[in-house]
């Protein structure tokens, strides 16, 4: 996924709607799972995890996905509490980096 995010066009597609973005099925499954963990973590089932394992992901990778989702949820709550606009921060980062 890191390679895909170096392409600004694909990164924009993912941010807009990853379900229709020009990305592989594994990445879409990971993002779908990340959304579920973000919105309704209590509904994650063994079947959700097995679907990702069927794509070849290890339990360590699954843990990392949940860990990253949790971290971003944490950071977003802090930003919300202090009125920090993370989108502005990310936009500044994208516009200050040279095109690849």
Image: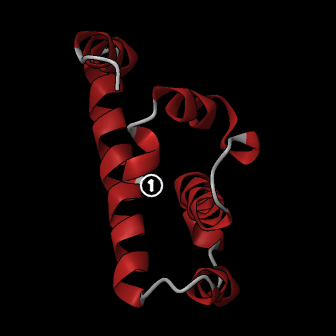
Tell me where residue 6 sits by quadrant: top left
Depth check: give the residue in front, 92 or 66. Answer: 92
Pinpoint residue 75: horizontal percent, then vertical percent: 28, 39
Tell me where residue 20 sits by quadrant: top right
| Residue in the image at 64% along x and 58% along y | 28
- Name the image quarter holding the N terminus: bottom left
On screen, residue 3 versus residue 83, left or right, reads right
Depth check: give the residue in front, 34 or 18. Answer: 18
Pinpoint residue 53: horizontal percent, then vertical percent: 56, 88
Q: Residue furthest right?
A: 20
- Name the image quarter holding the C terminus: top left
Question: For the residue carrying disc 1, how many other residues have a C-alpha within 10 Å: few (<14), some (14-19), or many (20+)?
Answer: few
Residue assigned mark 1? 1
> Vertically, is 37 above or below 92?
below
| Residue in the image at 63% along x and 88% along y | 54
Pinpoint residue 27: horizontal percent, then vertical percent: 57, 60
Number of numbered tags placed on the structure image: 1
């Amino acid at each position: 996924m890191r390679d895909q995010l170096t392409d600004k066009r694909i990164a924009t597609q993912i941010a807009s709607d990853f379900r229709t973005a020009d990305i592989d099925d594994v990445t879409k499954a990971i993002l779908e799972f990340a959304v579920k963990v973000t919105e309704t973590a209590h509904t994650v089932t063994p079947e959700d995890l097995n679907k990702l394992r069927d794509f070849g992901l290890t339990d360590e990778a699954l843990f990392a996905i949940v860990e990253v989702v949790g971290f971003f949820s944490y950071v977003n709550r802090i930003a919300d509490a202090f009125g920090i606009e993370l989108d502005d921060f990310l936009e500044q980062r994208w516009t200050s980096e040279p095109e690849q």
